[in-house]
Image (cartoon, rainbow, N blue to C red):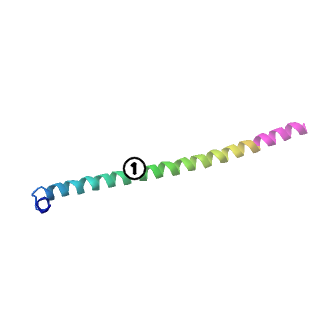
Amino acid sequence: MHEILYSPYIVPLGAFVVGIAYYGFTTWRKVREREMNLESDLRQKEMEHQQKMKTMELEIARAKESKREE
């Protein structure tokens, strides 16, 4: 067991593993940030769409009402 700890390959392998872990973490964080931005954009577009649909429904109701009055 002690031979493994004093191996000349421990430090280079450790540095390699830390570098891979750092790269993986930063990549994951960037992907997650993009995902959150896309999700918020989608919510915003969905809210705008709902607003447009409500406006159209009101216009349709007004048009039907004006037809009834004629």
Task: Label the magenta part by its dominant secondary structure.
Answer: helix
Residue for point 23% across, 54% down: 17
Residue for point 54% across, 47% down: 42
Q: Position of residue 26 (x, y in %)?
A: 33, 54
Which residue reaches farthest front?
1
Residue 3 is drawn in which quadrant? Answer: bottom left
- Residue denoted by label 1: 31
Q: Quadrant of the N terminus?
A: bottom left
Tell whether 39 sits left or right of 21.
right
Q: Quadrant of the C terminus?
A: top right
Residue 11 is drawn in which quadrant? Answer: bottom left
Residue for point 66% across, 48% down: 51
Residue sitting nearer the eye, 22 or 61: 22
Tell whether 51 sits left or right of 61.
left
Residue sitting nearer the eye, 17 or 39: 17
Residue for point 24% across, 57% down: 18
Q: Is residue 50 above or below residue 15?
A: above
Residue 67 is drawn in which quadrant? Answer: top right
Circle 1 residues within 10 Å: few <14, some 14–19, many ≥20? few
- Asked whether 65 falls inside the magenta stretch, the response is yes
**Dot 1 amino acid type:** Val
Q: Position of residue 62 (x, y in %)?
A: 81, 42
Q: Which residues are magenta?
A: 59-70
Residue sitting nearer the eye, 30 or 64: 30
Figure label count? 1
Q: Which type of secondary structure does the marked residue at label 1 adopt? A: helix
Which residue reaches farthest right?
69
- Asked whether 11 falls inside the magenta stretch, the response is no
